[in-house]
Structures are given as C-alpha cells and as structure tokens.
Image (tube, rainbow, N blue to C red):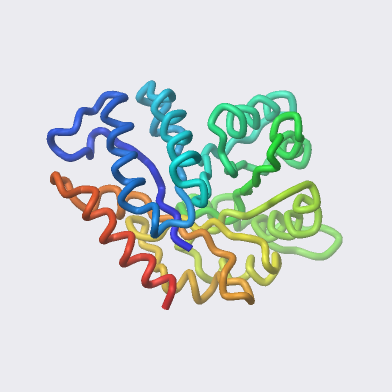
C-alpha cells in the first residue's frame, strides 16, 4: 500500500549530486530503483520538476517507471482544475505526454471540469482520476470543513465531495479520493461513504501522519483500498552517499506499519 512520492528538491540533494536536470533525474531514478519492489505506486509532483525547468527529466522518469517497473502505478500529482476546454489539455498532458496511470485533480470547479479527464480522446487508456477531498494541510479546514446543505441535509464540504464521487463521478470512469493521513477521523468518515473506492493518503512521515493509524481508519472492508504516500521522509532519509539505501530502509519501515 506504500506510495513513494517523488518531490525532488535540489536544495536537499546529497553532497556530490548535481542540482541540474541531470541530477534531478539521477536522484529520482536512484530512489525508484531502491524502492520499486516495496512500492505499489510512485507519485511525481509536477511542480518540483517544472520550477527547475526539468519537465524533460519528468518525462524520462515517467517513461522509466512505465517501462522498467510496469506493475507499479504511476500517479502524476498535478492537482489540475479548470474549465472544460483547458481541462482537455491538462488531461492530455497527464495521460499522453507523461503517460500517467492516474492524475490528481481538484474538483472544486464541478463536474464539467472533471469530465475531460475521463474523455477517451484525452485519456485513451482509461487512466484513473484522483479527486481532492480532505487534504492533509492545516489550511484545508478553511474551506473543506465548511458545513453546507443540500437536499440530504447539512454536512462538511469534503463530505459532499466524497458523496458526489461515490454516487456520480465514479460512474464516469476509474476514481479515487485524496484524504490526508493527518485527519484520521475524516478518513474513516470518507471510507464509510465511498465503500471500496481507493483512497490516496498523503501526509505520512514529515507531515506527522502515522501509517498504522491510516490502515486502521482507512482500509476498505477487504483490508486494502489504500495508497499511502510518503515523500520527504523517504527521499531525504540521508544526505550522504547512502541516500538510496537509507530511502529503502525508511520505505521498508513504513510498509511494515501498513502491513501489520
């Protein structure tokens, strides 16, 4: 159930590793090779590459995962959300340029901003759409916990998103939801609403979320249904030449907590 997030920050690279595009690719490939047999997914965060002008490295890394580790899911963490005509292009970027198996999407502009991600013209292989629901950051409370009403009564906004995903958006294609490890009570609430739909759970490790608590509160009735992401705690487990070995050891510790 472990997802390894690829958030390459050159300011935190081990000494001796270049901070240019080649260094970014080398760093990510080393992490991938060290953890691929432990991970169910890799999740490159597009902003970490784009801010360095390293989209070419991202393309190369995505291709490397697809070709070298075909059984590991590739999630592009892009959090895209815009009107339909723009969403068409975001979907093509994710599924055709970067060949992602799934992409994170911000659903707060509504159904017409989500539908393009399911359109076979943009997403010919039927890739998954992972919708933000209850995010792991403290500021998520600002909007996601606001109580609003519909014909079924008053409930927090993140509950509306979970219900709409389970009842409507999941009928468009493969869906999952993002729910942060830092909010285990809300994680349990969302699991009750969505049944067996997969949940991508960030926030384990550096953000303070606990893998065992996530498994307890977020597992589907089958005992599965979780994609639990850890990024910084794994990537930067060491600042020395042993960074890949240290990343593997941290990944093993996290995976062990998920399987208990």
Residue at image location 45% in from the left, 55% down from the top: 3
| Residue 239 point in image, percent of width and height | 16, 46
Total marks shown come to: 0
| Residue 234 point in image, percent of width and height | 31, 53
Q: Is residue 9 left or right of residue 54?
A: left
Q: Nearer the viewer, residue 84 or 68?
A: 68
Q: Quadrant of residue 50?
A: top left
| Residue 123 point in image, percent of width and height | 69, 35
Work out which residue is located at the far right of the displayed protein and give it.
151
Residue at image location 59% in from the left, 43% down from the top: 101
| Residue 34 point in image, percent of width and height | 30, 51
Work out which residue is located at the far top of the displayed protein and give it.
53
Q: Is residue 130 left or right of residue 141?
A: right
Residue at image location 49% in from the left, 51% down from the top: 72
Q: Is residue 40 left or right of residue 235?
A: right
Residue at image location 71% in from the left, 63% down from the top: 155
Image quarter of the C terminus: bottom left
In the image, residue 122 sits, relative to residue 229, either above or below, namely above
Q: Quadrant of residue 14?
A: top left
In the image, residue 80 sits, relative to residue 163, either above or below, namely above
In the image, residue 199 sits, relative to residue 26, either above or below, namely below
Q: Is residue 198 left or right of residue 60?
A: right
Q: Nearer the viewer, residue 187 or 121?
A: 121
Q: Nearer the viewer, residue 199 or 208?
A: 199
Q: Nearer the viewer, residue 72 or 49?
A: 72
């Amino acid at each position: 159930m472990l997802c390894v997030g690829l958030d390459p920050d050159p300011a935190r690279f081990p000494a001796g590793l270049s901070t240019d595009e080649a260094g970014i690719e080398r760093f990510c490939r080393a992490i991938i090779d060290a953890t691929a047999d432990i991970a169910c997914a890799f999740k490159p965060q597009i902003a970490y590459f784009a801010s360095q002008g390293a989209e070419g490295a991202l393309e190369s890394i995505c291709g490397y995962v697809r070709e070298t580790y075909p059984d590991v899911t590739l999630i592009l963490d892009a959090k895209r959300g815009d009107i339909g005509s723009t969403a068409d292009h975001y979907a093509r970027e994710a599924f055709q340029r970067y060949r992602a198996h799934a992409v994170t999407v911000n659903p707060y502009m509504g159904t017409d901003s989500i539908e393009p991600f399911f359109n076979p013209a943009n997403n010919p292989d039927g890739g998954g759409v992972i919708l933000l629901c209850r995010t792991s950051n403290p500021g998520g409370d600002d909007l996601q916990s606001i109580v609003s009403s519909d014909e079924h009564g008053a409930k927090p906004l993140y509950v509306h998103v979970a219900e709409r995903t389970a009842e409507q958006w999941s009928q468009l294609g493969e869906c999952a939801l993002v729910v942060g490890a830092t909010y285990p009570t809300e994680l349990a609430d969302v699991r009750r609403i969505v049944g067996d739909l997969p949940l991508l759970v960030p926030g384990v490790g550096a953000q303070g979320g606990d893998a065992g608590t996530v498994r307890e509160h977020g597992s589907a009735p089958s005992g599965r249904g979780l994609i639990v992401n850890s990024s910084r705690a794994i990537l930067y487990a060491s600042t020395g030449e042993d960074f890949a070995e240290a990343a593997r050891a941290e990944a093993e510790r996290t995976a062990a907590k998920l399987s208990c």
